[in-house]
Amino acid sequence: MPDSPVSIDLGNQLVFLGTGTSHGVPAIGCGCPTCTSDNPRNRRTRCSLVLGLPEGHLLVDSAPDLRTQLLREGIGMVHAVVYTHEHADHLFGLDDLRIFAHYLGSDLPVYCDRQVQDRIRRVFDYAFDPASRAYPAGGVPRLTFRTIGDGQSGNGPIRILGAEVVPIPLQHGRYDVLGYRFGDVAYCTDTNGIPASSVALLQDLDVLILDCLRQRPHATHFSLDEAIETARRLGPKRTLFTHVSHDLDHDATNRALPPNMELAYDGLIVPVGQ
Ligand SMILES: [Zn+2]
Ligand SMILES: [Zn+2]
Ligand SMILES: [Zn+2]
């Protein structure tokens, strides 16, 4: 294993690693028009993105597709991770973070709330076993938690990799999850409700990245109509929809969307002003 990674430098950009719902698109065994489409933009891996910040690359969630996503984009280094919530489609690629602690020569910083941290400690218990931590570097994920939402930081802005990051509390059905604001870009996946106090944190955006699952309403995600209405209410310059299911064909949906709103797609790159 090399000691220093080969990687593109993201600079002030973010890359959509995945834009699909929890099953991914195509869904296993599905013969619907979207899942059998030969349009590459109808191929959606599980939801994640990575940003270039002043002091390195920040990964948002570790989807089950993490390894193939990073290889696909030529991203060989991640310097810190932040989690939106604990669901499997956002978390279960965590074991592939092993290599970054090896490259860093120290534990990988992981920013998340207490609930996500507890889930990680249960699901990836081997990573916190003192015996396995004695393995050679790269054997188990080596993580250092930085808790968001504790008594000290509340939900106010936090500093990650030289940038100010604002946690945005969101409702995801009955779950409390976090979106994040990075400068004039906000990432609000896995939500169907934005509390008034969070609406105040989402003003004057250049880019809003928002959950948009399908046509019909859903218990924990915005439908297309709800997502459009929410984007109109928040008024960003540009809205990109993510966490998209096979219900929405990329080109047909984009043709019908209002101006300045579009479905994101895997590999889409967006500038991030700081
Ligand atoms: Zn999800
Ligand atoms: Zn399908
Ligand atoms: Zn979720």
Image (spheres, rainbow, N blue to C red):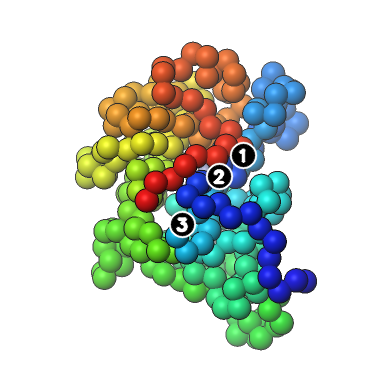
Name the residue located 43 percent from the left edge and 37 percent from the top edge. 209
Q: Residue furthest right?
A: 1
Residue 144 pos. (x, y %): 49, 74
Disc 3 packing (10 Å; few <14; some 14–19; many ≥20): many
Residue 18 pos. (x, y %): 59, 42
Left or right: where does residue 44 sit relative to residue 220? right
Disc 1 packing (10 Å; few <14; some 14–19; many ≥20): some
Q: Nearer the viewer, mark 3 or mark 1?
A: 3
- Residue, disc 1: 267
Work out whether residue 265 can be spotted.
yes
Residue type for callout 3:
Leu
95 or 159, which lies in front? 159
Q: Nearer the viewer, mark 2 or mark 3?
A: 3
**Disc sitting over residue 53 in the figure:** 3
What element does badge 3 sit on?
strand
Residue type for callout 2:
Val
Left or right: where does residue 233 sit relative to residue 14? left
Residue 256 pos. (x, y %): 49, 13
Q: Is mark 3 within 8 Å of ligand 1?
A: no
Name the residue located 75 percent from the left edge and 31 percent from the top edge. 29
Alpha carbons under labels 2 and 3: distance apart: 12 Å
Alpha carbons under labels 3 and 1: distance apart: 18 Å
Left or right: where does residue 14 sit relative to residue 30? left
Residue type for callout 1:
Gly
What element does badge 1 sit on?
loop
Q: Is residue 14 shown above or below 228?
A: below
Left or right: where does residue 172 sit relative to residue 39? left
- Residue, disc 2: 15
Alpha carbons under labels 1 and 2: distance apart: 6 Å
Precedes in sequence: disc 1 or disc 2: 2
Which part of the image, by quadrant, shows the N terminus? bottom right
What element does badge 2 sit on?
strand
